């Protein structure tokens, strides 16, 4: 998969909803119900971060849920890429980008949302052909003003800001011309997942899905 095609597919996924849930899952047995709740609330693109032992099994379970588009986040190595593909992930997200990681995703045919925090990083990815990128860590890197400033000289790149994004600032990010969607964990709070409050999570997802209205 070429970087250009990867970015096209990543952009399509980013446009499915204004928010991509960033999910840290400790218990894969809850993954399918969590996916159903988020999808029912209007958030079909789901990022499962590879930060827990249950992550790959969670991706496998979520991939079976109708209407969802499940991706793997925190991709750091070529092995992560292969593991994610084998588990059924249909897109990948990384906090940054290295040549080895980019090449692994291209060879595996996995659309990647590569992370960039500076103009130089965004330019390096653009030079390779990536026009859809993740702005991370968004708030720590200057937030909305920084992303707006980067967009002025590099309008070819569109972003999904993640890291410190919340209901309080999500609309500000979404109002930027170079923002396709935002990534956030607030739609699936740990306490609601652990208690199985799927109705509560669906309600949070509905609120998030309406952020660009």
Image (cartoon, rainbow, N blue to C red):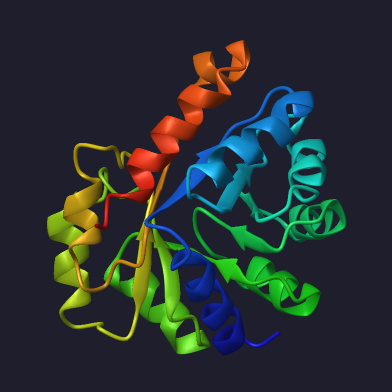
The quadrant in which residue 116 appears is bottom left
Left or right of 39: which side holds 86? right
Query: Would you place residue 160 above or below residue 42 in this image?
Result: below
- Residue 163 visible, this angle: no
The N terminus sits in image quarter = bottom right
In this figure, what is the number of numbered marks? 0
Q: Nearer the viewer, residue 59 or 41?
A: 41
Q: Nearer the viewer, residue 190 or 202?
A: 202
Query: What is the x, y in percent for residue 205?
Result: 43, 39
Query: Would you place residue 12 above or below residue 126 in this image?
Result: above
Query: What is the x, y in percent for residue 186?
Result: 40, 32
The residue that appears at 22% across and 63% down in the rendered structure is 147
Query: What is the x, y in percent for residue 123?
Result: 36, 80
Left or right of 142: which side holds 37? right
- Residue 133 visible, this angle: yes
The C terminus sits in image quarter = bottom left
The residue that appears at 60% across and 86% down in the rendered structure is 5
Query: Would you place residue 74 above or below residue 33 in this image?
Result: below
Query: Would you place residue 80 above or below residue 22 in this image?
Result: below
The residue that appears at 54% across and 64% down in the rendered structure is 97
Q: Nearer the viewer, residue 9 or 106?
A: 9
The quadrant in which residue 34 appears is top right
Query: What is the x, y in percent for residue 113?
Result: 53, 65
Q: Nearer the viewer, residue 184 or 93?
A: 184
């Amino acid at each position: 998969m070429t970087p250009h095609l990867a970015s096209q597919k990543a952009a399509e996924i980013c446009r499915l909803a204004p928010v991509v849930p960033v999910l840290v899952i400790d218990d894969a047995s809850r993954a399918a119900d969590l996916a159903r709740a988020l999808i029912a609330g209007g958030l079909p693109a789901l990022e499962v971060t590879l930060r827990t032992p249950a992550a790959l099994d969670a991706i496998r379970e979520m991939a079976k849920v109708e209407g969802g588009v499940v991706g793997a986040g925190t991709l750091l190595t070529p092995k992560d890429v292969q593991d994610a593909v084998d588990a059924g992930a249909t897109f990948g997200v990384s906090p940054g980008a290295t040549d080895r990681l980019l090449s692994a995703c291209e060879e595996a045919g996995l659309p990647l949302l590569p992370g960039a925090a500076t103009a130089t990083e965004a330019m390096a990815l653009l030079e390779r052909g990536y026009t859809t990128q993740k702005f991370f860590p968004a708030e720590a890197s200057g937030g909305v003003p920084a992303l707006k400033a980067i967009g002025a000289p590099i309008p070819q790149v569109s972003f999904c800001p993640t890291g410190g994004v919340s209901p309080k600032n999500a609309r500000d990010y979404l109002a930027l011309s170079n923002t396709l969607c935002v990534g956030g964990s607030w739609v699936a709070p740990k306490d609601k997942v652990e208690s199985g409050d799927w109705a509560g999570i669906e309600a949070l997802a509905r609120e998030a899905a309406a952020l660009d209205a």
